[in-house]
Image (spheres, rainbow, N blue to C red):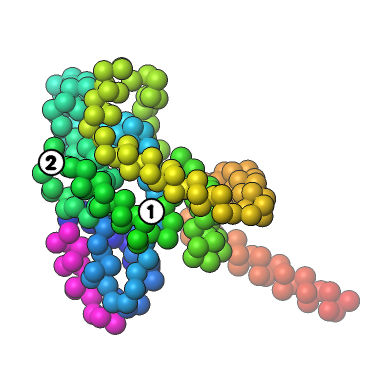
Amino acid sequence: MYHGQLLLEKDIVETLNSLSVERRSQIRMLWGHLIFGVHKHLPGTSTYFTFLRDPIERTISHYYYVLSRPQEFEIAKYIRQHNIDFHEALERELIRDIQNVQTRMIAGLPYDFPPNTYTEEHLETAINNLNDYFAVVGLVERFDESLLLLKKAFGWSNIFYNRQNKTPRRPYQDEVAPATMALIEKENDLDIKLYQFAQQLFAERLEQQDENFAKALRRFKFWNHTFYGPLKTKYDIVDGFVQKAYWQMRKVSIREMVKKQFNN
């Protein structure tokens, strides 16, 4: 498994080309915020999967995520210092990745592609790529069902998860001014169409599932949301030393128990 968090195509190519052909052939999964087209730089056949998100939700969440991290994003400091509101920040395009970003990435357009130049042809390319290269097109808003589809498609065993990177103090859609919502929709017109197409693909895939899928979904939701998520958060607090000490004690106690039982 290889994690790629690179957005510039030249960086992705350079990183992959820095690996030997043997090393690249050993990569079983390449994941991250990657632009479509990485398969061209890998040996053999590649299969894609992705999660698309409601473009309105994604834009709101991304803006407030950036704003909540002034230590990481200089533009967040600028917006705070000048008391710039959400609408003005969108109008002035102060935050990157708020305009048709999902269409851009799925269409294979570079990260520095000129803004305000996206066309219906780019949308068509993105749709064709989803049809031709992606085994599963998941939806963030249908995360559990998407994970089960991925499990079935790729034969995964463990898909339990706990939620991370939740944007703090972001408004809901009904709390955003109508004029600002209209601006978000205008800036993401192609993404909205792409997401509607993805919803259609997703619905068709669910219709192909048998009754066992619904049962598996109920079981997964129960175990993941009732036990795994809450317990994993607490378990992660425990450092490696304590974990190791705990299991060492378990080994000793079990060994002593077996010895005692054998002597009896």
Work out whether 4 lies above or below 19: above
Name the image quarter holding the N terminus: bottom left
In the image, residue 20 lies in the stretch drawn in magenta: yes
Helix, strand or loop for disc 2: loop
* 10 Å crowding of disc 1: few (<14), some (14-19), many (20+): some
Horizontal side of 231 relative to 129 (left or right) equals right
Can you tell which quarter of the image residue 262 is in? bottom right
Residue under the point 25% across and 43% down: 101
In the image, residue 36 lies in the stretch drawn in magenta: no
Can you tell which quarter of the image residue 119 is in? top left
CA separation in Å, label 2 and label 1: 24 Å
Q: Nearer the viewer, residue 169 or 179?
A: 179
Residue under the point 30% across and 23% down: 181
Residue under the point 38% across and 44% down: 197
* 10 Å crowding of disc 2: few (<14), some (14-19), many (20+): few
Helix, strand or loop for disc 1: strand
Horizontal side of 253 relative to 22 (left or right) equals right
**Do we see residue 71 in this rendering?**
no
Q: Which residue is mark 1?
A: 50
Q: Nearer the viewer, residue 101 or 229?
A: 101
Type of amino acid at the residue the image marks with label 2: Thr
User: x, y (%) of residue 74?
Assistant: 16, 37
Residue at the farthest right position:
264
Type of amino acid at the residue the image marks with label 1: Thr
User: x, y (%) of residue 40?
Assistant: 24, 69
User: x, y (%) of residue 250?
Assistant: 66, 65
Magenta highlight range: 9-22
Q: Which residue is mark 2?
A: 117
Task: Please tell me which of labels 2 and 1 falls first in the chain.
Answer: 1
